[in-house]
Image (cartoon, rainbow, N blue to C red):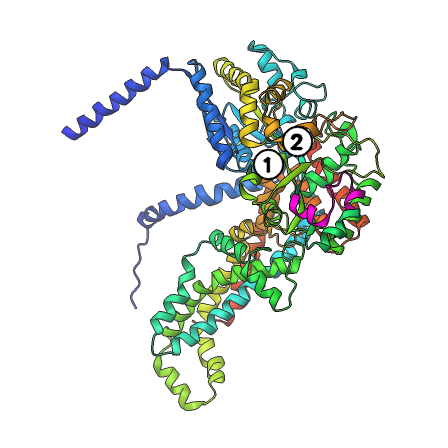
Amino acid sequence: MQRKMLFAAALAGVMGASGLAQAEPTEITLWHAMGGRLGEVVDEMTAEFNASQDEYKLTSIYKGGYEDTMTAAIAAFRAGQQPDVVQVFDAGSATIINAPGAVFPVEDLMKKYGVGFDIDAYIPGVRYFYADSDGKMIGMPFNSSTPLLYFNKEALTKAGVEPPKTWEDFEAIAPKLVEAGYVPLAQSHSPWIFAENFHSRHNIQMATANNGFDSTDVKILYNNDAMKMHWSKVKDWKDKGYYGYYGRNWGDNQDAFVQGKVAMWLGSSGSFGGLRKSADFDFGTTYLPYWESITKDPKGTFIGGAALFALSGKSDEEYKGVAKFFEYMTKPETQFFWHKETGYVPITTDAYALAKKAGYYDETPDAEVGIQQLSLPAGEWTKGYRLGYYVQIREVMYKHFEQLLNGDETVDAAFDGIETESDELLDRFKDTYN
Amino acid sequence: MKRVQFSGTPLPYFFVLPQIAIVIVFFLWPAAQAVYKSFLLEDAWGLTSQFVWFRNYEDMVLDADWVNTAVFTVIFSMIIAFASLAIALTLAVRANDILRGASTYKTLLIWTYAVAPAVAGLIGNLLFNPLIGSMTHLLHALGWEFDRASNGFDAAFMISLIAVWKQVSVNFIFFLAGLQGISKSVQEAAILDCRSRSKRFWTITFPLLAPTTFFLLVINMTYAFFDTFGIIDTTTRGAPGGSTQTLVYKVYTDGFIGADLGGSSAQSVVLLLMVLVLTAFQFRFIERKVHY
């Protein structure tokens, strides 16, 4: 009996405490997909944001990989338990942007809650990637990276060659690298590097309806001559031993470079920090090569990575906190810290200027290559793409690229397959999200 | 023998109620949901949905990828079931025969039972790593240009090997128990009648093991269909070119990663029916030949 009373007293105590909590700051939550060191940096930023003011308390929760985080957010949203902010990756952005009323557009949110918003403050490659067809920013670009060429300086010196600017250059130096005992090239993400950014770099349209920004009624345009030429070359390189394919696992391809087996590797600007720790040789970075036979005037690439989306169905109080948080996130100091700690590019021109002024690029010039590439002149087709079920479309591409590389399919058959299967998926998406 | 009967009282129903409740809440209700969702085109967030009858099924059957996956799943399951049963049976017969150190052998063989499929996948992934995997080096030394990254057969070989390795121990336990359940007098009588060891096995031991084998066949097919998910997810993720993708894995990638709930539900309903038909078939045609 006595124990029961004690329990009741304890319960009352707990309830009293939660009653008190009402006076405490408004809680806002962020679900993110940044594991390992990246997660630690997010935690540090969260702590700093919380310390910077006392009206709101942000809790950041790591939810696993990009897909896990998105799935968790979807499940929570359906149950009415969604977080205030969720990090959604590039290929999944159509699923959240096209769902009517799932998000509170970041531009509206920041304007409504009085923290101000100017889309021109963002660097060109980032600006419209998560925007709607009218150019209104829906998601706040968060971790943004872009594909770069990393090269093993020792290997290139040994072969007596310079890092390639164009794929023509690459073809010229590849035999020398093979002679020096290296696999000249590997890359870690075929759809992202050899399809999406291939189109941006050469300023080629990748889908109808303005790369999918204008409508969900869209067809894929991957089945074009430039793309087919590139992939027949890739197949040729693989057969000649110029190109090593270590599977679709990002790390397996990166490891081949880190272990000095591969001389040049196409990865993400975000890989820079990790490589600096893991590679015990001197390496450099340069822009993603382009085909001179396709264009004499190469454009910038667009970003990969993820953005922060404010989900709908929350109170004014919480949105105010989210606006404050977004304001904090876009501050030059925050962005510079994020850029330095992770290798992701700073998303605003002010942050980029700050990093320059602080002399960061004097010590580590390679850290600047990503943002320089994103700041290259924009073309008509460099602002991004908005394609539904793009996660599945990437799977389709992987499938056909792999069949092409192992000789099960001709280049023509592979791209016919990509076109048909992608269009079927886009059609399903259109009918689902209309 | 006297049979116990509780005729006319609701008491037995009351006792099975918890079990039935669990079945309804955790099996029937979600299955019904899947059937319902399979007729819908619904956005991931549940904001809009429309009833489209058999559109999802139509899209699924017309999808060459799904057809390939289905074919692969059936072949893969048969290979896994057959190989792991055959290896386990051989090992069980051998382990049952030895006199000295029998328990050491048995323990070692049963050991891998404790390994979860995902962990088995991680181990296999490391062993077959293209750069540092010792199995890759071994196969290369044997003259097989093993390349799991772009060769579909090699990748399928790898996951089959891992799946079989993981499953042999389970089958081994059951076969060993089954072998020990065969009465000594029958075996001794057989020895008097027939000198050939293999003939004795096929005419006496194997038929007497039939109930165990049949049970294991059902279990192994289900294992190959569903439980290999962990292995695939930690090794190939269906690559290269979808050549190691099973139906369950496709349900997962389309539904959870791709956020296409209608299409994924339609696939899972078909999967459900396939397993139902398979089990019914096994009970109808194979069980007839089993003598308990």
Label located before the other in sequence (1 or 2): 1
Residue at the location (53% across, 64% down)?
Answer: B81
The answer to whether tags 1 and 2 share a subunit is yes
Instruction: Examine the rendered structure and indicate whether residue B216 appears above or below residue B258.
Output: below
Our reading of the magenta stretch's main secondary structure is helix
Q: Position of residue A353 (x, y in %)?
A: 63, 19
Q: Position of residue B23 (x, y in %)?
A: 43, 46
Distance between mark 1 and mark 2 Cα atoms: 10 Å
Residue at the location (72% across, 51% down)?
Answer: A177
Q: Position of residue B282 (x, y in %)?
A: 53, 63
At label 1, counting other C-alpha atoms closer than 10 Å, the crowd grade (few under 14, some 14-19, many 20 or more) is many
The part of the image, by quadrant, that contains residue B261 is: top right
The amino acid type of the residue labelled 2 equals Gly
The amino acid type of the residue labelled 1 equals Phe
Residue at the location (37% across, 85% down)?
Answer: B188
Tag 2, which chain? Answer: A
> Where does the C terminus of chain A fall, quadrant-wise?
top right
Q: Is residue A79 visible?
A: no
Q: Position of residue A340 (x, y in %)?
A: 55, 28
* Residue A158 in magenta stretch: yes
Extent of the magenta region: A153-171
Tag 1, which chain? Answer: A
Label disc, if present, on residue A272 of the rendered structure: 1
What residue is shown with label 2?
A370
Label 2 secondary element: helix
